[in-house]
Image (cartoon, helix red, strand yellow):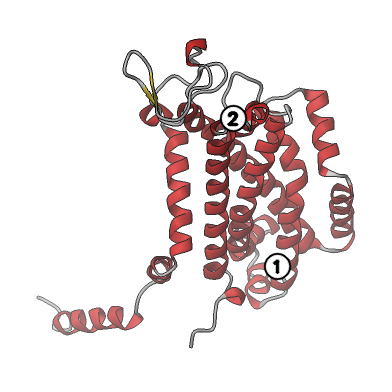
Amino acid sequence: MDNPMDAGDAPRFEQELDDRGPSDLQLALQDLLKRPPALFGVFCIIVTILWALAPGLFSPHDPLQQDLLRHLKPPGFVDDAGNTYWLGTDRLGRDILSRIIWGSRVSLAVGFAAVFVSGFIGISTGLIAGYYGGKIDAVISRIVDTALAIPFVLLALAIIAILGASLQNIVLAISLRTWTVYTRVVRGEVFALKDTDMVTGARSAGCNTFRVMLVYLLPNVFSSCIVVATIYLGRMIIIESSFSFLGMGVPPPTPTWGGMLADGRGFLDTAWWLTFFPGVVLTLTVLGVNLLGDWLRDVLDPRMKRLDD
């Protein structure tokens, strides 16, 4: 026999769902659509990620193919075979557009890998320092102060000089400095959360330390970590390009944006496109990441939300 309350409960349940209003995700997307700078940042990041994931689909030519007959050809050059080089060629006759597209793989790989490694180290140490406090916090804080006292360029030079220039060593050099930012942010928030009723109740219920950190503390500090990661992603792309520009990055012939800028600095008067186009792409990518980070900060950090009401 059917329950007589089912027919009446369904409309009531639907009405309760309607009364809840839009979800947080829907509100965030609505806010994103109202902010053209953030939309521009999302567009720049999506294009760069697509280039990095499938460069062969977008690259018109082989980025490593050399032909001295195409030496320093300007943008729009068409060879005898009918191939168009939309952004020109470099001193070895390689296509600039193809090298920019393939170079995005190195920049994003270093950026995301460094964010992951430094975030893992920083979040872990921040949770431990904030939760335990006392001597453990003092030791971790002194390590952070020591890491910040060492000049970043000197540390990077030492690591690369000892281990050699490679993608992994660049990630290591960046991560050994940027993890301190996550540690400080997480440590401060855990200090404010560890004495709340939520954490006290979890400990009273018999939850071990690892479960309290993973289930009750980490989700509450994760939004701040996402904001830090997004903001620092652009900086890490800049750092990787700086290393490549100085000859400390991924060795040639692998195309990198910083390496392309270094190759073109001797031809600024005669072949401006060698540095102009890689510089524009690098600028737009970092600008897009920063714009997206600003929007995420406003959405995820309630203290940064604007008082519209």
Q: Is residue 175 above or below residue 258?
A: below
- The kind of secondary structure element at disc 2 is loop
Q: Position of residue 160 (x, y in %)?
A: 78, 28
Q: Position of residue 131 (x, y in %)?
A: 75, 63
| Image quadrant in which you'd find residue 269 | top right
> Label 2, on which residue?
256
Work out which quarter of the rendered image holds the N terminus and state it. Answer: bottom left
Left or right of 113: which side holds 88?
A: left
Count up the numbered dots: 2
> Label 1, on which residue?
189
| Image quadrant in which you'd find residue 107 | top right
Left or right of 35: which side holds 156?
A: right
Residue at the limit of the structure toward the left, as seen here: 1
Residue at the limit of the structure toward the front, as seen here: 269
**Residue drawn at point x = 77 percent, y = 63 percent:** 130
Q: Position of residue 128 (x, y in %)?
A: 76, 56
